[in-house]
C-alpha cells in the first residue's frame, strides 16, 4: 500500500517521500522527479515499479525550497518548476537521494529518474556508491557532466527529437561513455515517458520501460 513518509537527510533536513512496494523486498528503487514535483506521473511510475516487486521511494526534492509542490505541464507550471529547481543545489538533492536509498533498507538499490531526475540519476551514479544501477531518462544536465566516472551500471534514454537535448549532445555522451548503453528513440521528444505530457510516445515509453526493468532485474539481482 502506498503512503507518504518523512525522511531525514544527513544535514538534518526533513522531507516527504512517496513509498510503495513490498515491505520485505530485498531490492528497491529511488524514483526521481522531473521539475514538476512528486506529481501523478512520478507516483504512477513508482507504483509500476512497486508492482514489479521493488520497494520504491520517491523523494520530494522540492521540499528544500517549498513543501507540497505538485505541478502540471503548462507554461506556468514549467516556469515555476524551473524557479524551484534553481533553489535546490545538486549537493542538496544528492543528500536527499542518499537518505532515500538508506530509508529503503534493502540489500541492493537502484535509481531511476526523469528529466531533472534523469540528470540526478547520473549524479547519484557518479558521486556516490549507494546504487547498484542507474537508469537515466532524458536528463538535460547529462551532456555537461558526460565525462564523469560512473561507480555503477548505467543506462540512458533520450528522444531523437528532444529540443533541449540535441542528437549532437547525445553523440558526445556516447563518445565519452562507450561502455554505457545510450538509447535514442526515433520520433520521440522530451518527456516521451510521461503519459501526462503532450510529448508522450507510447512506443518509445514501452521499449524504454522494458529495457529499464530488464536492466534492474540484472543489476539488482
Image (cartoon, rainbow, N blue to C red):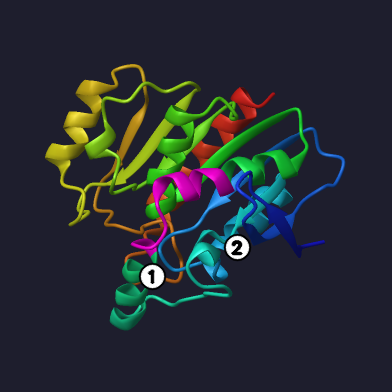
Q: Residue at x 28, y 54 (%)?
A: 188
Q: Earlier in the sequence, mark 1 or mark 2?
A: 2
Q: Nearer the viewer, residue 7 or 27?
A: 7
Residue that badge 1 annotates = 197
Please say if the residues under marks 1 and 2 sit with CB atoms less than 8 Å apart. Answer: no
Relative horizontal placement of residue 194, taking residue 215 as reference (left or right): left
Callout 2: SS:
helix
Relative horizontal placement of residue 133, taking residue 142 as reference (left or right): right
- What is the residue that sits farthest to the front in this orientation? 11
* Residue 54 appears in the picture as rendered: no
Q: What residue span does the magenta drawing correspond to? A: 85-96
Percent from the top left, x then y, of residue 172? Answer: 17, 30
Residue that badge 2 annotates = 44
Q: Residue at x 24, y 53 (%)?
A: 187
Q: Residues within 10 Å of mark 2 (few under 14, many from 20)?
A: few
Q: Residue at x 57, y 73 (%)?
A: 67
Relative horizontal placement of residue 149, taking residue 102 as reference (left or right): left
Quadrant in the picture for residue 25: top right
Percent from the top left, x then y, of residue 39? Answer: 54, 70
Position of the C terminus, as image quadrant, is: top right
Percent from the top left, x then y, of residue 133? Answer: 54, 29
Q: Nearer the viewer, residue 6 or 121?
A: 6
Say if 152 sits above or below 29 in the image: above
Q: Residue at x 43, y 60 (%)?
A: 34
Say if 143 sits above or below 188 in the image: above
Callout 1: SS:
loop
- What is the residue that sits farthest to the left in this orientation? 168
Q: Nearer the viewer, residue 33 or 45?
A: 33
Amino acid at each position: 500500500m502506498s503512503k507518504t513518509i518523512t525522511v531525514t537527510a544527513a544535514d538534518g533536513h526533513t522531507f516527504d517521500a512517496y513509498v510503495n512496494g513490498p515491505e520485505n523486498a530485498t531490492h528497491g528503487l529511488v524514483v526521481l522527479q522531473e521539475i514538476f514535483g512528486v506529481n501523478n506521473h512520478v507516483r504512477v511510475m513508482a507504483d509500476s515499479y512497486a508492482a514489479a516487486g521493488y520497494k520504491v521511494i520517491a523523494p520530494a526534492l522540492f521540499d528544500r525550497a517549498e513543501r507540497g509542490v505538485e505541478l502540471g505541464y503548462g507554461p506556468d507550471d514549467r516556469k515555476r518548476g524551473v524557479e524551484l529547481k534553481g533553489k535546490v543545489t545538486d549537493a542538496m538533492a544528492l543528500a536527499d537521494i542518499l537518505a532515500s536509498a538508506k530509508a529503503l533498507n534493502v540489500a541492493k538499490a537502484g535509481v531511476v529518474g526523469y528529466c531533472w531526475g534523469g540528470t540526478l540519476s547520473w549524479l547519484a551514479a557518479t558521486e556516490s556508491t549507494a546504487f547498484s544501477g542507474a537508469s537515466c531518462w532524458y536528463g538535460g544536465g547529462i551532456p555537461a557532466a558526460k565525462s564523469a566516472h560512473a561507480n555503477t551500471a548505467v543506462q540512458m534514454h533520450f528522444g531523437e527529437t528532444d529540443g533541449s537535448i540535441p542528437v549532437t549532445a547525445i553523440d558526445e555522451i556516447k563518445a565519452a561513455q562507450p561502455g554505457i548503453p545510450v538509447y535514442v528513440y526515433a520520433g520521440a521528444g522530451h518527456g516521451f515517458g510521461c503519459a501526462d505530457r503532450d510529448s508522450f510516445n507510447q512506443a518509445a515509453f514501452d521499449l524504454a520501460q522494458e529495457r529499464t526493468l530488464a536492466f534492474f532485474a540484472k543489476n539488482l539481482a
